[in-house]
């Protein structure tokens, strides 16, 4: 005999109703109880009870507005105005830029602090604290969570940045969670900017709906995100996809790390290991001998790295982004070279603008919403 499944408790049903009310109001600035019931498919009396509980909890307010027209007037409700904001921050060689976003995904504040490639850990920490402090002072309800995109590898266990040899952006082992602890009340999530870019491309870009692909960033720095079964794979220390030191074919055919190819071609910034993206874009333009040589050298070097990546991850798609990676001449040369290999894979240019911030912002809103839902029943 099959035993009957246990029925959900009254408390569980109330919690689910309250979550439906909150999440519906997160998607709509104001609603009547009748509108919430229609959108959720839950009965009006049940929704009315849930709204009353959330009003008592301080999470929902009566706006004071009433419906007009025939019939009984309905009261409009919205989320309470001081539920807190999420911090979205980007740490790059250009500086630290940050936004404070609300539960509806609207930007309520922005701040920026300049950096350079040799900023160092302490200056980067000061810049991050500066923008967080500035935004936290004006955030209604404070900063409840933060999501950080960093132009360096990130240790997945601690959120600290990882310093690798020859890294063009020198900020040491910056610890964003520790820096933000005085300013952010809740969790701080940190990941590499290329990983965030891959998530953005999978959500709304050229990799939408693709579960297995790699995102290769070719800019001042070099990076790769590996996506399998729909998830970014970060590795034990968060170093999965670091391709700068992968051995490949140099301009003269000898083996060398990918990062050294740009030194041989004279396409590094003076006194730095950063690729000179502007000089590279100029070098590959036109049909002259120098342009063809540079395009061919880049295609062989990047193609060698892609061969290794494909061998290990078996992707359906390769997305190429970055300042010079999306250059039509570069993308075409890489595609033509790689297509002649033993395991050709479709190549597409990245399409999302500011992809790292797009994905980090989306995650920040999701995290903020979850915190608010959990606060309705803190003991649950």
Image (cartoon, rainbow, N blue to C red):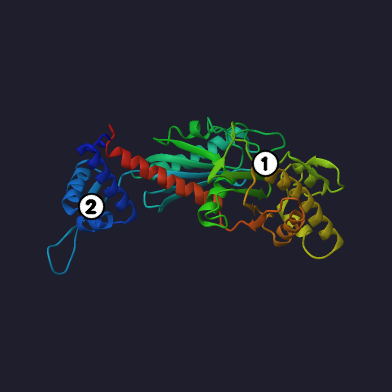
Q: Is residue 322 left or right of residue 330?
A: left
Q: Nearer the viewer, residue 276 or 250?
A: 250
Q: Which mark is residue 42?
A: 2
Residue at the extreme bottom of the image, as rendered: 70
Q: Which mark is residue 161?
A: none
CA gap, disc 2 to disc 1?
49 Å
Query: To which residue does mark 1 refer?
Result: 312
As helix, strand or loop, the secondary structure at mark 1 comes to helix
Residue at 81%, 45% in the rendered image: 249
Residue 89, horizontal then vertical, whole percent: 50, 44
As helix, strand or loop, the secondary structure at mark 2 comes to loop
Q: Is residue 236 left or right of residue 325?
A: left
Q: Is residue 33 left or right of residue 213?
A: left
Camera sees residue 294: yes
Task: Quadrant for the C terminus, please.
Answer: top left
Q: Which quadrant holds residue 9?
A: top left
Q: Nearer the viewer, residue 259 or 17?
A: 17
Camera sees residue 114: no
Residue at 65%, 37% in the rendered image: 170
Residue 283, horizontal then vertical, whole percent: 79, 58
């Amino acid at each position: 005999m099959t035993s009957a499944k246990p029925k959900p408790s009254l408390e569980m049903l109330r919690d689910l109703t309250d979550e439906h009310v909150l999440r519906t109001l997160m998607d709509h600035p104001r609603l009547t109880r009748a509108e919430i019931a229609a959108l959720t498919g839950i009965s009006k009396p049940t929704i009315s009870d849930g709204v009353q509980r959330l009003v008592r909890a301080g999470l929902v307010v009566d706006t004071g507005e009433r419906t007009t027209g025939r019939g009984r007037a309905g009261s409009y409700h919205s989320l309470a105005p001081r539920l807190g904001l999420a911090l979205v921050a980007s740490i790059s060689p250009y500086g630290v830029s940050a936004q404070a976003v609300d539960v509806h995904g609207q930007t309520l504040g922005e701040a920026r602090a300049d950096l350079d490639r040799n900023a160092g850990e302490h200056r980067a920490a000061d810049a991050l604290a500066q923008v967080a402090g500035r935004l936290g002072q004006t955030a209604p309800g404070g900063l409840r969570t933060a999501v950080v995109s960093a132009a360096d590898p990130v240790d997945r266990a601690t959120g600290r940045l990882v310093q690798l040899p020859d890294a063009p952006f020198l900020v040491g082992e910056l610890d964003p969670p520790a820096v933000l602890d005085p300013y952010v009340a809740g969790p701080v999530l940190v990941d590499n900017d290329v990983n965030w870019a891959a998530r953005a491309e999978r959500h709304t870009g050229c990799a939408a709906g693709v579960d297995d692909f790699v995102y290769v960033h070719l800019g001042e720095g070099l990076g790769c995100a590996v996506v399998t079964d729909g998830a970014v794979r970060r590795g034990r220390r968060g170093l999965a996809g670091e391709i700068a030191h992968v051995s490949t074919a140099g301009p003269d055919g000898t083996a060398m790390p990918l990062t050294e190819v740009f030194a041989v071609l004279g396409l590094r910034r003076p006194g730095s290991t950063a690729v000179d993206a502007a000089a590279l874009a100029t070098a590959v333009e036109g049909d002259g001998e120098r342009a063809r040589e540079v395009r061919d050298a880049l295609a062989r070097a990047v193609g060698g790295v892609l061969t290794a990546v494909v061998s290990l991850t078996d992707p359906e798609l390769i997305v190429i982004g970055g300042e010079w990676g999306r250059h039509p001449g570069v993308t075409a040369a890489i595609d033509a070279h790689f297509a002649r290999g033993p395991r050709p894979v479709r190549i597409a240019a990245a399409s999302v603008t500011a992809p790292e911030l797009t994905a980090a912002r989306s995650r920040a809103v999701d995290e903020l919403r979850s915190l608010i839902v959990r606060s309705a029943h803190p003991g649950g």
